[in-house]
Amino acid sequence: MFDLNNRDWAPFKISDLFQPARGTEKNMTSLQVGDVPLISARNCDNGVKAFVSIPNERLHRCHVITLNNDGDGGAGLAYYQPMEFALDTHVTDLRPRDSSGNLSRYAMQFVAASISKQRTLFGHGRSISLKRLNLLRVMLPIDESSNPDWQFMEDYIREREAIQIEHCCEFLMKRTSDIESERESNRLRTQLFLLVQKKLGGIPNQPDIRHSLWKAPRIPKPKARKTPIHRSARQQQRYRRFCSR
C-alpha cells in the first residue's frame, strides 16, 4: 500500500504546471437545456450546476482541472473534468502545459485533491484572482530529480480507487441480500395472513382479521381538568343567599 508520509514533498507553482483560462458563460439563465455539463462554483457534484446546450466553439475541452474562484463554500475547490463542458465566469480552467508531460487522469485527480486542501485560504470575501493564482503553490510528491513524481500520484489514486470500488461492491452485495431477505419475509407474512383469514372465514360472528391486525389502537382523550372558580367576597355572599332560597 502506498504511503504519503514516506514521500518527499515540494511546493510547485500552479501557473508553472498549468495554463489558466477563465470561464466565459455569464448569463446562465438564458441557456437552454441540453446534454453539456455547466461547471459553476459549487461545492458538490463535481461543480456541475446544470446541463445546457451551447455551440461547439464555446465548449472547454476535457481532461482539465476546474478551480472555483469564489462562491459560498466552494472557493478553492478543484475538480477533474473527464468530458467537455461549459464554464461559468466564477471558475478557472487549468490546462496542463507541455512541460508537465502527458498526465493521466489519476495524476490530475491527485493534483486537484492537493489544490483543494488549500481551500481554507480563500472564501466568499477572498476570491482567487489571476494575480493570486500566479502566486498559488501546490504541494506534490517529488522523485529523485526533485520533479513531480507523476507515476507515484497515478499509482496512489489507482489504489484508492480500487479500494473504493471494493467497498462499493461489498455494500451492494449486502444491500441486495437484505432486499431479498426482506422480500422473502414479506412473502411469508402475506401467506400467513391469508391462511389465518381463511381459517377464520368459517367462524360465525368473527370480525374481519384485517381490522383486528391493522386497525390503529384507540388513544383515549385526556379528561378536561376542572378549573376552580374564584369569587370575590361580595359574589360569595350573593351565591350563599341564592342557594339558601
Image (tube, rainbow, N blue to C red):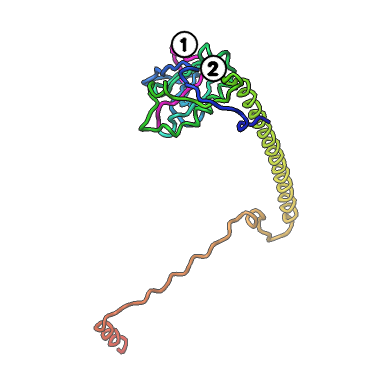
Circle on res. 56: 1
Residue range in magenta is: 52-71
Task: Determine whether 153 is above or below 198 in the image.
Answer: above
Instruction: Locate residue 22, reporting x and y percent.
Output: 41, 18
In the rendered image, which quarter contains the N terminus? top right
On whether residue 27 falls in the magenta region, the answer is no
**Outermost residue, left direction?**
234
Task: Determine whether 222 is above or below 239 in the image.
Answer: above
Residue found 37% across the figure and 20% down from its top:
26
Neighbor class of circle 1 (other Cα within 10 Å; few <14, some 14-19, many 20+) is few
Instruction: Locate residue 142, reporting x and y percent.
Output: 58, 23
Instruction: Locate residue 49, reporting x and y percent.
Output: 46, 26
Q: Amino acid at mark 1?
A: Asn
CA–CA distance in space, label 2 to label 1:
17 Å
In the rendered image, which quarter contains the C terminus? bottom left
Circle on res. 149: none
User: What residue is pinned by disc 2?
Assistant: 63
- Label 2 SS: loop
